Amino acid sequence: MEKMTQLFYDVESDVLYLSIGEPRAAISQELGDDVLLRVDSQTGEVVGLTVMNLAARFGSLNSPQSLPLEINLHKLG
């Protein structure tokens, strides 16, 4: 069964959360520029991505935006 990818944007914190499957506890690895990769510490599986200061990057988020994002997800190690 494919895992559903979920997106949630927290307006107050200006943070975009991307979860692969149900959100769960993970460790974060900074990729740079306020972007964090979330990894399951037990399995090494990538479980999400966090992008901080999203509106600061793209200006107003009042209208639909396209995010210039390419993600290649695979198991670490």
Image (tube, helix red, strand yellow):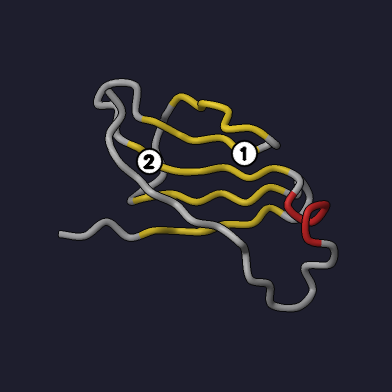
Residue on which the image places disc 1: 35
Residue 55 or residue 77, whichever sits in front: 77
Q: Where is residue 4 shown, x and y percent of the image?
A: 32, 60
Query: Quarter-wise, where is residue 77 in the image?
Result: top left
Residue at far left of view = 1
Residue type for callout 1: Val
Mark 1 or mark 2: whose residue is earlier in sequence: 1
Residue at coordinates 77% horizontally, 68% vertically from top-left? Answer: 61
Q: Nearer the viewer, mark 1 or mark 2?
A: 1
Residue 49 or residue 32, whichever sits in front: 32
Q: Where is residue 30 shown, x and y percent of the image?
A: 58, 28
Residue 18 or residue 57, whichever sits in front: 57
Q: How many labels does the image show?
A: 2
Residue at coordinates 46% horizontally, 34% vertically from top-left? Answer: 38
* Quadrant (top left/top right/bottom left/bottom right) for the N terminus: bottom left
Q: Where is residue 50 shown, x and y percent of the image?
A: 57, 42
The answer to whether 40 appears left or right of 63 in the picture is left
Residue 68, labelled with which disc? none
Secondary structure at badge 1 equals strand
Residue on which the image places disc 2: 47
How far is mark 1 from mark 2, CA to CA?
Answer: 14 Å
Residue 76 or residue 12, whichever sits in front: 76
Query: Quarter-wise, where is residue 67 in the image?
Result: bottom right
**Other residues around mark 1 within 10 Å, as few (<14) / some (14–19) / many (≥20):** some
Residue at coordinates 44% horizontally, 49% vertically from top-left? Answer: 19
The answer to whether 63 appears left or right of 39 in the picture is right
Q: Where is residue 18 shown, x and y percent of the image?
A: 50, 51
**Other residues around mark 2 within 10 Å, as few (<14) / some (14–19) / many (≥20):** many
Query: Quarter-wise, where is residue 2 in the image?
Result: bottom left
Residue type for callout 2: Val
Residue at coordinates 37% horizontally, 41% vertically from top-left? Answer: 47
Secondary structure at badge 2 equals strand
